[in-house]
Amino acid sequence: MKQVWQIDPEFRRLSVPLSPEEENRLESSLLREGCKEPIAVWHGCILDGHKRYEICSYEEMDYKTVEMNFVSREDAIIWICKKRVKESSANKTIYKYLVGKWYNAEKTRIHAKQKEKRRKSLDLAIKQKGEEGQLVSIPVNRISKVIAVQISMSYNSVESYGMLAKFLDEISEKDEVFFTALVENKIVISFEKLRKFAQMDETKLIGIRRKMLREKDVKMRQRKPRQQSTDDSSGKTQQEQTAPLEMGIKEMPVFDPDMEFRGLALTIPTWMNAIARTRAKTDIDLVSEPTKAQLAMILRRLEEQITQTLEVIET
């Protein structure tokens, strides 16, 4: 029986979002070649490979795991961030978030060590050759310089990304959908607005997120398709070109804006009855853990779609 691994929200947030095309390629690769790369786990939680685990569980595919040996949660976060930073583009919000989480975790880890050793100074200076071959000593209280050297970035940027990560985490605690939209660059805002949003209460924050996504959707709908240039060498007259188009428009059915919603309203009760019937007739204790995990994942996906649809309807 396969073990069901826990999904830690903080570890999951450190995953680099995949585009629909990238996710399709990953799924096709797994179905074709199997899951070759082990899924990294720690204390019963997945650290790396959330999407692979999700696909393998859904498709009932075999996969391997590797147990990571970390002393603290901060060590695990730092390992994930270092790995993910290499996979992300520097101009993306997720990259800045990962750098900020890395920096914040390093500070937390150092403070913990200082507390254990009764706040004695730690000799954690890092030496790095400067441009002229001289050794540059980086003190522990400027861990941002340590990270900056490793990823070729100014330490001021590292420290500002630490604040950005803090604000994003505060937003995620109140509205996970808003957090996802921000790190996936679906919503782009200034640092000052991010600071302001992080201080808002949950109800107000959700309202702003709905408004921003709705406005973006309206702008996308208002975009006019590019007009294709006509081919002068075709020899067709304007009447010959427009006649088939007019005929096609006349043959189109009358638009019914309620059609999709009515169809969904008729379909969902069937799902509800099937779920209730399955729950009533099935002995849950006899169901295998992988099957439970598979159904739970599908139900969570359905729950997300229901939540998003309700937000659109009730706004």
Image (spheres, grey):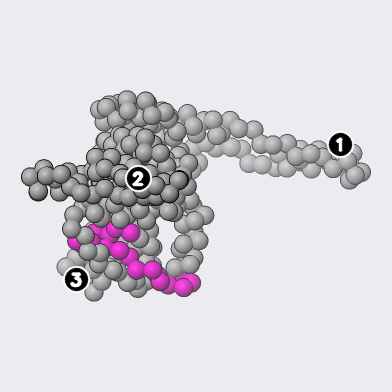
The local secondary structure at tag 1 comes to: helix
Q: Residue at x 66, y 42 (%)?
A: 252
Instruction: Report which residue position mark 3 lands on.
Output: 286
Instruction: Report which residue position mark 2 lands on.
Output: 136
| Residue 100 visible | no
Q: Amino acid at mark 3?
A: Leu
Q: Is residue 288 above or below residue 209?
A: below
Instruction: Report which residue position mark 1 lands on.
Output: 238
- Residue range in magenta is 31-48
Task: Kindly report the distance in space between the C-alpha atoms of the residues bearing marks 3 and 2.
Answer: 63 Å
Q: Amino acid at mark 1?
A: Gln
Magenta segment: does it hold 34? yes
Task: Kindly report the distance in space between the C-alpha atoms of the residues bearing marks 1 and 2.
Answer: 74 Å
Q: Earlier in the sequence, mark 3 or mark 2?
A: 2
Q: Amino acid at mark 2?
A: Val
Q: Residue at x 27, y 27 (%)?
A: 199
Magenta segment: does it hold 196? no
Q: Earlier in the sequence, mark 3 or mark 1?
A: 1
Kindly identify which numbered label has been placed on residue 252: none
For the N terminus, the image quarter is: bottom left
Disc 3 + disc 1, Cβ < 8 Å? no
Residue 245 horizontal side relative to residue 202, left or right: right
Q: Is residue 155 above or below residue 86?
A: above
